[in-house]
Image: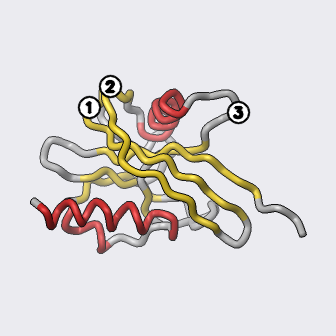
Amino acid sequence: MEEKKRVWVAVGVIENERGDILLAKRSADRHQGDRWEFPGGKVESGEDLLTALDRELWEEIGIRVLDCIPFMELCHDYPEKSVLLDIWKVTRFEGEPYGREGQECCWVPLARLHEYHFPDANAPIVSRLQQGLHRR
């Protein structure tokens, strides 16, 4: 039996001063395409996690991470691959986020995240963010 491909992904949950969360839309031709996601991407071989997070957020949405804190870590198995998501809450950043790869981006109030269609692996992130909303 062939072993599934494993992918390590650095993910940024980016919050603005109003408490809105930045989402980016995956292109339709990508895995789990045409869905909204928290920006990030693969950690390259030999790269440390925070370097990867900063690089991916720069490449995808044009921001530099100034401060971030660990948010959660999760594994998700798709039929064709397994992903390990290292999720960080970006608390300070430099630049104005926009879709550098042509993707749509938007700021979404925390209470409305459930209205967006996410990749399956992102469901626990949305749940955890919204649990925090109900504790306020």
Mark 1 residue crowding within 10 angstroms, few (<14) / some (14–19) / many (20+) = some
Residue type marked 2: Leu
Dot 3 or dot 1: first in sequence order is: 3
Residue 92's tag is 1
Q: Mark 3 near mark 1, Cβ–Cβ under 8 Å? A: no
Q: Does dot 2 land on a helix, a strand or a loop?
A: strand
Dot 2 or dot 1: first in sequence order is: 2
Q: With 55 as the anchor, is 112 left or right in this view? A: left
Q: In terms of depth relative to the viewer, which is nearer, 89 or 58?
A: 89
- In percent of width and height, residue 84 lies at 58, 53
Residue type marked 1: Arg
Q: According to the image, label 2 marks what residue?
A: 66
Mark 2 residue crowding within 10 angstroms, few (<14) / some (14–19) / many (20+) = few
Q: Residue furthest left?
A: 136
- In percent of width and height, residue 90 lies at 32, 38
The quarter holding residue 134 reads: bottom left
Q: Does dot 1 land on a helix, a strand or a loop?
A: strand
Residue type marked 3: Ser
Q: According to the image, label 3 marks what residue?
A: 45
